[in-house]
Image (cartoon, rainbow, N blue to C red):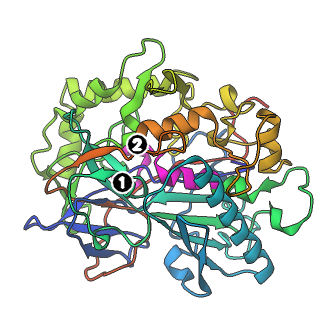
Amino acid sequence: MLPSLVSLALALAVAVTKANGSPLVVVASDQDDNLINTITAVKIERPFDYDPRSGFSSDFRVSNLVLTTNDRNFLAAQQGNLSLQTVPQPFVISFSCNISTTICNYAKDGFTSAGKRITSALNFYKAINIRANFYSFCGGRTANCDLKDTLGQAAATAYFPAKLSNESDYYAYPQALFKQLSINADIKDSDYSQYDILAEFNSDFNFHFNASGQPIQPGQVDFEFVVLHELTHGLGIDTAWTSYAAIPSLSSYSPKPDYLAPIPSLVGSSIATATVPKWNPLNIYDKFFTESASSQSLRSAAAKIFSFDPNSKKLSSFIADFQSSGSPYTAAQSMYKLVTSGSKALTFAIPETTTTPKQTAFLNTIANRYVAGTSIAHLDYNAYWQTPDFLMIPAVQNLTGLTLDQIVLRYTPTATADATYGVLNAYGPLTVGMLHAMGWPTKSAPERLAVVIMDNSAAILSAGQRTRGDIGVSLLCVVVSVLVAVWSGAAV
């Protein structure tokens, strides 16, 4: 991110099911504005209701974090001034902008260019539908507003549990990626959420827009950099591991901050009455986590945690019993200790392919601190901000005052424009390797990964989906990857 970038990847959530077993999808926003959709496909839909400003240490710039429902105009309130912006396929963007026509057009151009950059690196078999909002997070009043330096956020709207045919473990694939795969079932278009990615950007911030024709100024952040970073989270760079103490809906049940675990499935009409029939699977991004020191996969830690049977207990009892479960809880504590043991403690192990060797990418970990939305969900700042893989670092304090093209050429001097789209590819080799490992077809390896879907799975939805709503319910949801402008763990 650029100064104060929030990259929201909506990493957690709850799967909600009717008591009779028929799946429902929670579509969350404000407390009194939650919708539920009936679904017919295997899907996990994820909402969010996360206040990142509570519980963080004082030296972390919490003003760079995601929005609360009380502090912002939620996505649903921005229905006016909606237009359909078609980016050269595969991106179709429904864009809402409530500021000047000139700035709105500049922002549209930024989305168009970001879509071209992604398409120059990845192969698409189905279109990606994005709902994007550009509006004032502070309601036009930036004085004493904690959110004035928050740049943006994005999230996948839904995840589908699936596995490789020769493996036993299921992982949650973000909808945008899942649509590109070769699936062992007939998934109808109506089974998908209306949008694949939801994104919001803050018009209070002084962005630079390439379409303006003006040179970027010192301290400005390139809007396209922010868009590309956030959309990449929506494509799948997003973890299911979290601290329950960092989620407002769970923190009262789980005040202990010293463990990390995936969010379980919930059944019921409210958090207070919800029961827990099972765990949700890890995200496909999480499959490749290894401990840097030992090169040991963290899948064994997840297996120990999943060995604790939720047994349809009430949420409060589930958390209390989990914290007294012995080996499963010890594994969750060990995960927390690893992620807070210092920089470069965790890696993403990129498997060897027919064209590329095995590689490792250091993920963002911080000594003595777990920061929801920043830890794990980004690449290590100090290792990569001066490399071709700068895009997915958690902060941009040393990259402001530069356009995205200038940064690409600084760290990849031999870069040339894509012949089809006329843009420079801003994805470094590690970023492409991570996306390909998760299943994304790339220009050099365009084949569709074959997967087997999970039967009878409740699906998880993300931020603000609003189609086919019929019943209201208020349930939990969470967080996101946060991209900030200045981060204390980064070199200055």
Residue 333: give its label: none
Image coordinates of residue 313 in percent, x first then y, are 12, 49
What's under tag 1, amino acid-wise? Phe
Nearest the viewer among 263 and 457 is: 457
Quarter residue 318 falls in: top left
User: Was residue 262 drawn as part of the magenta stretch in this picture?
Assistant: no
Nearest the viewer among 303 and 176 is: 176
Q: Name the residue located 51 percent from the left edge and 44 percent from the top edge.
A: 442
Magenta span: chief secondary structure:
helix
**Residue 267 visible within the image:** yes
Image coordinates of residue 154 in percent, x first then y, are 54, 59
Residue 98 drawn above or below residue 117: below
Image coordinates of residue 140 in percent, x first then y, are 73, 76
What's under tag 2, amino acid-wise? Gly
The single residue placed furthest to the top in the displayed view is 294
Judged from the image, the secondary structure of the residue bearing numbered disc 1 is helix
Q: Name the residue located 73 percent from the left edge and 43 percent from the top edge.
A: 396
Image coordinates of residue 477 in percent, x first then y, are 38, 58
319 sits to left or right of 367: left
Nearest the viewer among 436 and 17 is: 436
Judged from the image, the secondary structure of the residue bearing numbered disc 2 is loop
Residue assigned mark 2: 439
Magenta extent:
228-250
Quarter residue 23 falls in: bottom left
Q: Name the residue located 73 percent from the left edge and 48 percent from the top edge.
A: 424
The single residue placed furthest to the bottom in the displayed view is 80
Dot 2 surroundings within 10 Å: few (below 14), some, or many (20 or more)? many
Residue assigned mark 1: 178
In 3D space, how far apart are the residues under numbered discs 1 and 2 (Cα atoms)? 9 Å
> Quick check: marks 1 and 2 in contact, CB under 8 Å?
no
